[in-house]
Image (cartoon, rainbow, N blue to C red):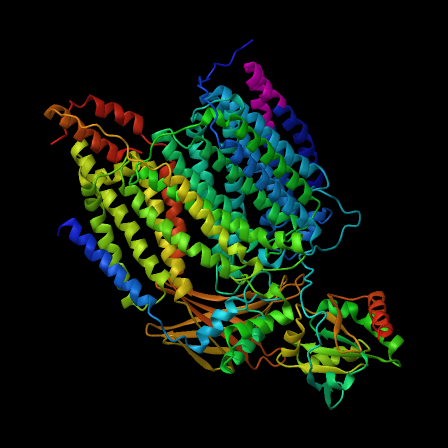
Amino acid sequence: MALLPSDEVVTVVPAPSRGAQLVRLAVIVTLTGLVAVLALGFRRDPQDIRTGTVGQAAPAFDLERLDQPGRLRLADMAGKVVVVNFFASWCIPCKQEAPALVRAWERYRNSDVIFVGIVYQDSPDAAIAFHERMGQTWPIGFDDPGRTALRFGVFGIPETYFIGKNGVIEGRHIGAIDEATLIRAIDTLRDKQ
Amino acid sequence: MRPRVAIALGTAALAVSIAVTALPRAEPQEDRVERISTELRCPVCQGLSVADSPSDMAREMRGLVRQRVAEGRTDDEIRAEFRQAYGDWILLSPPLLDARGAVWAIPPLAVIAGGVLVARRLRREAAAPVMVTPAQHAAIERRVLEEALAE
Amino acid sequence: MSWGDVGAGALRAAFPLALWGVVAATQAAWRRDGRFLASARMTAIATLALVTVASLAMVGALVSHDFSLHYVAENNARETPTYFSAISLWAALEGSILLWTTILAGAVVYVAWRGTRELPRLATTALALLFAMLSFFLLLVVTPAADPFVRLDAVPLNGRGPNPLLQDHWLMGLHPPLLYLGYVLFSIPFAYAMASLILGEGGDRWMVATRRSALVAWALLGIGIVAGGWWSYNVLGWGGYWAWDPVENAAIMPWLAATAYLHSVMVEEKRRMLRTWNLALVIGTFALTILGTFLTRSGVVNSVHSFSQSAIGPLLLGYLAAVLALSVGLLLWRSARLADSGPVAPISREAVFLFQNVLFVAVTLTVLLGTLYPLAVEALSGDQVSIGSPYFDRVAVPLGLALLFLMGVGPQLPWHGASRATLERQFAAPVVTSGALALVALVVGVRGTAAVLAFALAGFVCATVAQELARGIRARGTLHGESATTAFANLFKRSGRRYGGYVVHVGVAVIALAIAMSQAQAVQAEATLGPGGTMEVAGRTVVFEGLRDVVEPRRTQVVADLRVIDGGGSAPLVAALSYYPNATGAIGSPGIRSSATEDVYAILAAYDGRSRAWATIQIRIIPLVSWLWIGGAIVGIGALIAALPAARARERLVAATVPAGAGAE
């Protein structure tokens, strides 16, 4: 058997120092905490940003209407459930969610529910063309230069806000929305006094 | 020039320069816009500030800040307006006097704690006076030179 | 046989081999049996060969657009140019882990063949640990966690193409591999340190043996970080190079910890102190490289870079937890053997190193804290908060300036303490230089306190280095009778570690100055112009000549042609927005005109989508920013000088034969 040459060094072990226990404890606690925080991070979706205007009175807007002449004012919609959808023609998920919005709109159009589209950073012509192509018939307003979106706390479109009869924002959805979510949110608000 | 005089002059020049930079200056409006924008997070970007982001939304937000500055609002009022819409998330650094301001205290505490730990070990090394012969002196000179080249 | 078969086969063969490597190296270390060592060495070679084959197979699949592989279909398209196809090896998670595994296999071979010759027992133990790490990464690539060779049943006609940000600049071929090399090479000092603890050694042989790998890893990581900044400056289109993005932080943290380590090893070598501390720094550095990978790849933080979310997160976290538990456990268990003591003179080089270590660790902790704080707050309270550059800048700038100061002070102080007269002699010239430079900064219009201090301290550091060089040249002249030029060359050749280190210091001073000036003194202007319109920025006229549409197979571009007119004449500049089929938004391609004094940075911010009748142009004048990249190169050159083997031993012998006192006055 070929033995490897030994390269050991002899070490004298001094007595352990006092206070070391405390340091040990601190190191272990800190590192455990670090790993725990990282583990908890898995429960978090970095795309889901919850903070914002939910629970606050909806910021008033008064916008130029694009689908027909006139103004689009939140003040005119008091006492109704209002669904505000921020969109643009260049936004791909806006295209994906359009059919769900249209179906929900057909379901509630003759009730106390109002749908409103707010055009976000788009040209008026492109927005009108998109609106018609998607078969949307609810009013749309032109948000120039994007101040309404800033007051609502829009992160990125599409984004949909649900305003109760009392004028308070009761819910919001970031990203493409589906029909079930729309119906659930609207029904909750309609039942609420 | 004697080293001591040179050090005094250099230090004085440095101190004067720092004092000049510390003089209060009027902050132009555009600098204020820039400074406030630096502290706001761009909502559509990933981690960039409103001042840095080239996105349309950041441009709008800078526009709003500029308008508010022109209207004569205070920094706090402008920040509060964004905070109302976007929550604490929009601020890129937590306010100092806030429950979450603790994050500001950790770095200085780390420096102080580390400094104290090191300072406790600082002690002058005991050096006994020795008599040196001329031959030994030459050897010491040589060692000093070698040390100058050592790792 | 397809590329996929070759790659998948090679990896599946490599995994059991690496496991055998663990067993063989452990046996070799435990029983001191040379046959096992020979086996471990051959296993190392075979594993490296297999993972290299797998990497090349992936590159082959990418370059030949083999969309039957999921990875290729996701990260490549027929239109992707060959260069960007090849470097798509690290465009996404699976390929990056494959590259990582390959580099790690290279490190295993290095230790198996080089390391075990120098220190058989220690290096063989380290080899077992490295084989264990390699097994973990091979486990990732042979299981669905990060299998790069997953097949598609339905082969698409074309792939989605690489992430647009990653196919926009040649630097993408450089920045990630440099970072990975830096990350992975830190495994060597870590494995040796752990081997030393396992064997119960109290000495610092592990440290001496891995000095060079630590230095090389540090340098590659540092250059990789600067290259990343350069990439970001060229591609992200906001005129900056560093955003304190979580993943940038992940790269800088191990670098900071390693910088502290590279300095504190010198204290251990000279004074036999700080043994526990140096082990802790090596563990910390290595753990931070894993944390960095975790942050990049798990998707728990929001970042430009975390373009992947996968099941790999929990595995990497488990790996991190295991590494921390084992290494910290070992360190605490053995720490009694490592106890060291001894006084430190208040004004001595070792004292400066200690304070420097405190500051570096404080910066590292700050970055770590700032990066994880939003995670912690959300985990505890559910609130969402942000920590970004205002926080990091405010904390890191004062600490950085203090470090710059210590960087000038340290080399001027002797070990064991200094007399007052020595101090005055050593610091006269540097202090005068720094005072003078502070005044120069004021005269050229710098107004920020931090920027003026950066000027002064950069001058201070460079003056100390110049003085050290002069001293070294004089010393060689006296000792060896060399002329000034020969002595200058020989300083780097024979005392490379020390003088290479000084070159690194100069590079860092240059970088500090470039950062201070580009941050504090940049000027910007924005205007919406029609064709022929002009705007004035800081004494320059920028003419907007018009918009063009450029259609390429892989992208379409809207290009703004600009002309910059200043005292020196006029030059064209092109800023563009690029649209890739797989991206929702436009990717900015800024126009940059660099010079030694400043960059003109042009951004096409917005344009008339219908008739191309107007464009919004943003111009930034950024002073001295190109010195940031030059400083990075200087750091690299300095590190190279320091890492090259010196002809020291031979010289000692020659010097010893010179009659005593011959050179002394």
Q: Please, is residue A171 above or below residue C152 in the view?
A: below
Q: Please, is residue C157 above or below residue C57 in the view?
A: below
Q: Quadrant of the N terminus of chain C?
A: top right
Would you identify the image quadrant in which residue B44 lies? Answer: bottom right
Question: Foreground residue, C544 or A185?
Answer: A185
- Residue C56 in magenta stretch: no
Left or right: C13, with C285 as reference point: right
- Classified by dominant secondary structure, the portion drawn in magenta counts as helix
Could you say where residue A65 lies in the image, as x and y percent from the top left? 72, 86
Q: Residue furthest front?
A: A18
Which residue is drawn at the image coordinates 50% and 29% (left, top)?
C193
Question: Foreground residue, C4 or C621?
Answer: C621
- Residue C29 in magenta stretch: yes
Could you say where residue C5 lies in the image, as x and y percent from the top left? 71, 38
Could you say where residue C493 lies in the image, as x and y percent from the top left? 30, 36
- Asked if residue C65 shows in the view, the reply is no
- Asked if residue B23 shows in the view, the reply is yes
Could you say where residue B32 lies in the image, as x and y percent from the top left? 46, 73
Q: Residue furthest top?
A: A1
Q: Quadrant of the C terminus of chain C?
A: top left
Highlighted magenta segment, given as a residue range: C23-46
Question: Foreground residue, C360 or A137?
Answer: C360
Left or right: A73, with C438 as reference point: right
Q: Residue furthest bottom?
A: A69
Number of marks: 0
Which residue is drawn at the image coordinates 70% and 37% (left, top)?
C142
Would you identify the image quadrant in which residue C269 lies? Answer: top left
